Amino acid sequence: MSSRRDVLHEVMLETGTTQSDLARLSGVRQSSISQFLSGKANMSDEQLSRLLACMGFCLEVVRRPVAPELTRSEARSWRLHRQLSTHLTQASLQLWLPRIERNLARLRGGVSGQPHLRNLDRWESLIERSDVPCLHRVLTGLDRESIEMREVSPMGGLLAQDERADVLRAAS
Amino acid sequence: MRRDQLEHAIRTACQIIGQPEVIVVGSQSILGSFREAELPADATMSMEVDILPIADDNEETARLADLIEGVAGEFSPFEEMHGFSIDGVDLKTSALPDGWRKRLVKVRNSNTAAPSGEPRFTGWCLDKEDLCVAKLCALREKDQNFVNALLQAGLVDPRVVVERLPTVPEEFRPGAERALGWIASWL
């Protein structure tokens, strides 16, 4: 899919619209348009749509599922955490707390640098707030933040070993 | 992670797959060149050791990696008991420059030996600049922080990293190009 910058550039070329023209038409400063086009600033779909409308175009955003590019290790970790997610409830979290707190203390003693330390803070905050919906998202998420949080996961020792073996078999 | 934990990981991985030697890739391989006390605190490291089994082809490497993972990987009883896990990886995991095998750093001592004292298993750790090349080709936040901390501490030579970056396999070249831009300010 084309980037927002490419789409804007393509329509400006097609319609012969200069940066100054577009600034006058849209009321967006020419310097901002220049920054969008050079990649120095990001623009939202809404901002792009507004600029395209000035040149007689609408923006179509296509939604489609995409298989993420994960390393072998990231994919395996996601499968294990996803399995654990099937057991996560407010009640189970309370039962898991002593183990999770021990794991967090151990990780604090052995992990260094960022983003690991920041992610340990995030885990700690979610656990303290018993934020089960957010924990489900971290256990199953495929965004970079969730992947990196699982690299310092305090969830060890909570998944039954036969379940773990099943997950690993399915992953190999 | 500490050097003694790395040595423990080497011994365990070799015992699991029944081989005398393995290769350590990932951040922890820096412990082959420096003890933990010599490393800057900002060098990003987790409690997981990436172990690459030595085999004739990638399929066999992957099979051995799975064996390691099953016994000592994430959420294993081994991790529960020892506080760190061993991640079995294959050759596709790391972007390594030409000649990396010849520069591996040997780790073999009484702590990498079986309980009876024999055999003494061997862990081959990535050379420190080769490790930086692999990290920079990925260039995630943790990779940048790791290399940045080593450079700031004067523990790796940026000129050597720059020389080796263009020699990674073809599929990693775009990453190497980005990395050359990143490291330029250190020259």
Image (cartoon, rainbow, N blue to C red):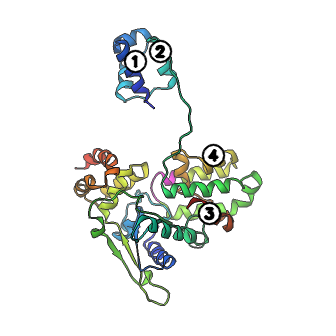
What x and y, as percent, mark residue A21?
Answer: 36, 10
Q: Mark 4, residues whose alpha carbon is within 10 Å: few (<14), some, or many (≥20)?
A: some
Mark seen at residue A57: 2
3D distance between C-alphas at marks 1 and 2:
8 Å
- Examine the image and state in which quarter residue B157 appears: bottom left
Q: Is residue A117 magenta?
A: yes
The amino acid pointed to by label 1 is: Val
Marks 2/3 same chain: yes
Query: Could you tell whether A135 is left or right of B92 in the image?
Result: right
Please state the extent of the stretch shown in magenta in the rendering: A112-118
Marks 4/2 same chain: yes
- Is mark 4 in CB contact (under 8 Å) with mark 3? no
Q: Is residue A156 above or below residue B143?
A: below
Residue A32 visible in the current orientation: no
Q: Given this view, does label 3 or label 1 mark the residue nearer the observer?
A: 1
- Examine the image and state in which quarter residue B35 appears: bottom left
